[in-house]
Amino acid sequence: QGEVGVACSMAAAGLTSILGGSLAQIEQAAEMSMEHHLGLTCDPIGGLVQIPCIERNAMGAAQAWNASKLALLGDGTHYVTLDDIIKTMKSTGDDMIARYKET
């Protein structure tokens, strides 16, 4: 959840900035894209977590694009803050058993 969610969030924020979004829209894009990675695990296939994570990275790229476009459609007003999502991701990661973590 962490690596892909953070990468997706940064990509969404960067794209929104490049496309001329306001700071509020940039934060909203980052929040939306990270929010949908909460609670995901690295599910080992054949003892390896790389296989699902490679595909998850590709899906994260598409999600970053969509989050950016959605944020640019609005004025940046949102109910869940990026700080709330970051705190929730940390808490979820702390609660998750090590077997489902890559790092």
Image: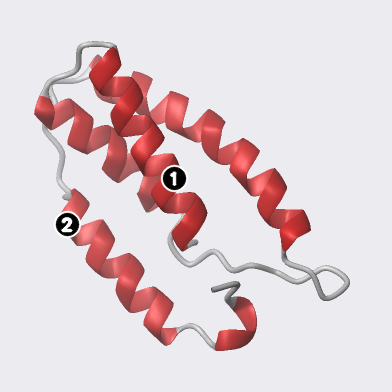
| Secondary structure of the residue carrying numbered label 1 | helix
Q: Residues within 10 Å of mark 1 (few under 14, many from 20)?
A: some
Read off the residue under disc 2: 83
From the viewer's perspective, tell me whether residue 62 is left or right of residue 28.
right
Q: Nearer the viewer, residue 96 or 53?
A: 53
Label disc, if present, on residue 89 of the rendered structure: none
Q: Quadrant of the C terminus?
A: bottom right
In this rendering, the count of numbered labels is 2
Label disc, if present, on residue 7 of the rendered structure: 1
Residue at horizontal 45 percent and vertical 61 percent from the top: 2
The correct choice, above or below, for 11 with respect to 33 in the image is above
Outermost residue on the right side: it is 46
The answer to whether residue 36 shows anywhere in this view is no
Task: Give x and y (percent) for residue 90.
Answer: 32, 72
The correct choice, above or below, for 48 with respect to 94 in the image is above
User: Please, what is the three-letter code of the amino acid marked with disc 1?
Assistant: Ala
Mark 1, mark 2: which one is toward the viewer?
1
Outermost residue on the top side: it is 20
| Secondary structure of the residue carrying numbered label 2 | helix
Q: Earlier in the sequence, mark 1 or mark 2?
A: 1
The correct choice, above or below, for 92 with respect to 5 in the image is below
The answer to whether residue 85 shows anywhere in this view is yes
Task: Give x and y (percent) for residue 15.
Answer: 35, 22
Residue at horizontal 70 percent and vertical 69 percent from the top: 43
Task: Give x and y (percent) for residue 68.
Answer: 35, 25
Using the numbered discs, state the Cα–Cα distance from disc 1 to disc 2 in whole angstroms: 16 Å
Task: Give x and y (percent) for residue 37.
Answer: 47, 54
Residue at horizontal 28 percent and vertical 22 percent from the top: 16
User: Please, what is the three-letter code of the amino acid marked with disc 2?
Assistant: Asp
